[in-house]
Amino acid sequence: MNRASPPSRVTSLDGLRGIAAFIVIISHLIAGFFPVLYFGAEGKADATLQHAIATSPLFVLYSGTFAVYVFFVLSGYVIAASAAKTRCRLPLLVVTRYLRLTVPILSSVCLAYALDRLFPGASQRAAQIVGHWWLGFMYQLPDPPFSAVLREGSYSVYWTGLSYFNNVLWTMRVELAGSLAIYALYLLVSKSVRVPVLLFTALVCFFVQQWPSNLLGFFFGALLFEAQSHGKLKQNSLLGAALLLIGLFLGGLPFAPAEGTIYEAISAFVGRFSPAFSTVRAIGATALLLGIILWKRSGAVLDSRPSQFLGRISFALYLVHFPLLCIGLSELYWRFGSSGPVPMTLSIICYVGVTILVAYVFTVAIDEPTVRILTRIKKAWSVRPARIDIVDEPAVALEARETP
């Protein structure tokens, strides 16, 4: 049977995750220091070209928001593959998933706390030069005590979706809730009705107006896994390329208001039923992943060494880049970068290089050891008989490189 099977896609998913993580870095860099390219003109009459780019499909090239929804769909896909063959009971999966996220999260919050103490007020000084509110919104004085680090890194970020120390942690509430929902569904719901339940849950999320609407991507990802594991997705390069382009187009939904842009009609239509901000991006991310699955040549970029390296350090890259940007690069910008394009370019190169280096060390020292320890714990406490499934082998491979 000619179908797009999970084994051939594992490395491509790593590459996609790595590219998405790098786009998040570029996204926040632009939001902080070239804000018109991200937020649009916001009433500035002399920003016509930058505003045109920010409200065009080109925005997808640096839309960190879209990259986050790619993470959500990938997580749904990968966790469904893991849940389909796990031998663990649900309480063990809940605990290990919590620890898998919390240990790196807490470490990143400690890093942000240390940087904030070393360079207090850095983001506010840079914001005054840039002349935009975004950087100034971060790390406002007075600094919270270290007890806030422990509270935020261990539980409050899951409850509130808010973080003083690392603003990107809003996604961790979605990651934890989405992954536990997939695990619960796969372990508690009969396999014969799994797909209808996934469809129904996705439909409910579609109509939710609050943060749980972000869970839509998880259920879309799980549905993609179900279709692929049952041989429903036959490779079709033409269809795959078309879906990939559709996904990229939808991913270009601007952060700026959609009124007056090519996305106005789409945003208005979806907004009648569901939050367009999240739903359009979740649909685009799903189309993108489906296109990659169907289009054989997509692996040429995603399987390259740079993409695979970024995929390996993607979770760490996501966690450490924000405090390094808002504090570290802000300090460089205040001292050197604002004096001209050459110092600014050198400051950006320094920031990107340091961020990749710190993310690599973070991966080797914290993230990968955490995954190894938790994998041993799950194997030691596995009690459920293994399911005989068409995806047994792929699920093992995917679980080993599970997305955060």
Image (tube, helix red, strand yellow):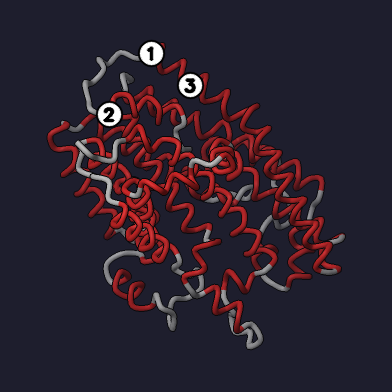
Q: Which residue is mark 2?
A: 391
Could you tell me if the residues under marks 1 and 3 are in contact, i.e. CB atoms within 8 Å? no
In the image, is 268 to the left or to the right of 305?
left
Q: Which residue is mark 3?
A: 374
Foreground tag (2 vs 3): 2
Tell me if mark 2 has few (under 14), some (14-19) or many (20+) residues whose alpha carbon lies within 10 angstroms of its own: many
Distance from label 2 to label 3 (Cα)?
A: 22 Å
Amino acid under disc 1: Trp
Q: Which residue is mark 1?
A: 381
Tell me if mark 1 has few (under 14), some (14-19) or many (20+) residues whose alpha carbon lies within 10 angstroms of its own: few
Of callouts 1 and 2, the N-terminal one: 1
Of callouts 1 and 3, the N-terminal one: 3
Distance from label 1 to label 3 (Cα)?
A: 11 Å
The picture places residue 246, in percent across and down from the top left corner, at 35, 63
> Element under label 1?
loop
Judging depth in this view, the residue of 268 and 82 nearest the camera is: 82
The picture places residue 334, in percent across and down from the top left corner, at 83, 62
Could you tell me if the residues under marks 1 and 2 are in contact, i.e. CB atoms within 8 Å? no
x 54%, y 73%: residue: 54
Amino acid under disc 2: Val
> Element under label 2?
loop
Judging depth in this view, the residue of 112 and 332 nearest the camera is: 332
Could you tell me if the residues under marks 2 and 3 are in contact, i.e. CB atoms within 8 Å? no
Q: Is residue 25 visible?
A: yes
The picture places residue 103, in percent across and down from the top left corner, at 57, 30
> Element under label 3?
helix
The picture places residue 174, in percent across and down from the top left corner, at 42, 46
User: In this view, which residue lies farthest toward the left?
Assistant: 192
Q: Is residue 166 above or below residue 392?
A: below
Of callouts 2 and 3, the N-terminal one: 3
Residue 52: assigned label: none
